[in-house]
Image (tube, rainbow, N blue to C red):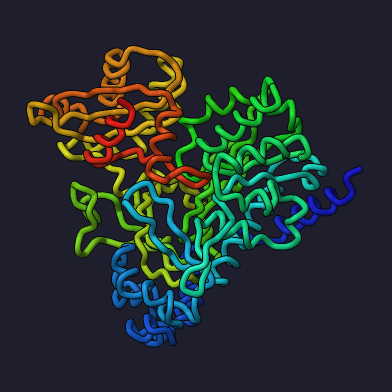
Amino acid sequence: MAILGKVIKTAIEIKQTLTPVMKDAQQAQEEQLRYLLEQAQQTAFGIYYGFAGILDSEDICATFQEKVPIHDYDKIYQKWWKQQQVVPNITWPGKPDFFALSSGTTGKSSKRIPVTKEMLAAFRSVGISQVESLANYDLPADFFEKDILMLSSSADLARRKGHLEGEISGINTSNLPGWFDGFYKPGLEIAQIDDWDERVTAIADAAPEWDVVAIAGIPSWIKMMLETIIKRHQLKNIHEIWPNLAIYASGGVAFEPYRNALEKLMQHPLIYMDTYLASEGFFAFTPRPGSMDMQLALKHQIFFEFIPFDESGFDETGELLPDPKVFTIGEVEEGKDYALLVSTPAGAWRYLIGDTVKFTDLEKGEMVISGRTKYFLNVVGSQLSEEKINKAMQCLAEDLRLDIDEFAVAAILNEKEAYIHQWVLGTDTSIDNKEIAHKLDDILKGLNKNYAVARKKALKDIKVKTVPTSTLYSWLESRKKKGGQIKMPKVMKEEMMMDLLAFSH
């Protein structure tokens, strides 16, 4: 009898019952902003931008937006975060114990994002809320006594300038609370293996010793891990070794393009959840069954703002306007795309994350990640958002009955100096490239009228190159981007696409 499991399950259900439904999201967010301003008012940033005066104003949200400019990474790092590595009290009290090396899919070098003890506490707070939401699912009591496998980046952190640094999943893994040790797999010893392939091999070797009921991680790397385990132990599917596996918490990229490929590795589908966890914070998670929409973490020491991802916020290339419209949670509308700004207890202030979100249910505070501000292919007016690109891949895979594990697209100039869209698709199925290009072109025309117009004008052609999925991962590895938190760039600049084409020749 799962006595401990019953105790944990009952405690979670009671906590859910006692937690009041949040009716005033705007008020909750004002409280988070007030906390952040109070904590940081004596920092260099807080003094420079007059946090004390903002706190005394009648409308702290409006005054905060008036006094503090919007920051992207380059702006806040060069002026503030760079100094924060060696000098205390720059954008947040004290000095950060950690800096997260962003695993972003663009750019040539990692970004360094401060992670304070207050930020780690906020990560844990949102994580606990996600665990509490399991009361909404019909799970057996013994579920809460079994193992949770979190596929992260290496927890072997490097020391630099008096702090430790690594990818955020590795930082979080190295700071898991003691009470979680009995549930967490693969355990810190394996998690600290730096080489990705060695780490996955160690996981596969240890897999029979665990009774895993939930897994978490980026879909592409979860798929590779499961395939390694299945091959290592000569299984038909992963449920032969983990019969109680019931939940998969995805994150980092859109899940749907990977669903079919993942389900082929299982005896039966799992309960799927989504998470919005970035180097800058844990922002949202799926709170209930029947949907992968996520609930924004509005009461966990993070202040959110929203810039319309249209002509009132951005130009046609996806660049932020000098004076964009900016809304708080009480002003957003359902069904519209917004670029996300966050202010956090790590000293990020009005920080442009680079993601776009879309609210699906304002009453529940639920949203989805709809894309990236820079993953917006519009060189010749095609106006393809990441959301439309992901949808096209899903439709293509379903129509042609093939698995597309990874993909990328770029607008490039052909030999006639005309723009075309060059696609590279990772699939282990043999298929004619011209056939797949024609089908993809038709799907995109149906999904996006601007694309259809562009195809009649400046967008002269669409080309597709299919390569084995392993080739794409080898290309990522050649760029020193392989591991649990690395994501394949979906929309590339021409230079990166030409590098990929040359590599996969």
**Residue 301 shows up from this direction:** no
At 80% from the left and 53% from the top, the residue drawn is 8
* Residue 232 screen position, x and y as percent: 67, 28
Answer yes or no: is residue 121 visible.
yes
Residue shown at 49%/78% (left/top)? 95
Q: Tell me residue 301's x, y (percent).
A: 53, 68
427 relative to 50, above or below:
above
Q: Quadrant of residue 132?
A: bottom right
Furthest-right residue in view?
1
Q: Nearer the viewer, residue 152 or 268?
A: 152
Q: Residue at x 39, y 56 (%)?
A: 110
315 to the left or right of 108: left
Q: Is residue 62 left or right of residue 397?
A: left
Vertical comparison of 431 with 108: above or below = above
Identify which residue is drawn at 53% across, 25% down: 261
Provide residue 257's location: percent of width, then percent of height. 46, 30
The one nearer the camera, 26 or 504, is: 504
Q: Viewer-proximal residue, 493 or 302?
A: 493
Q: Quadrant of residue 197?
A: top right
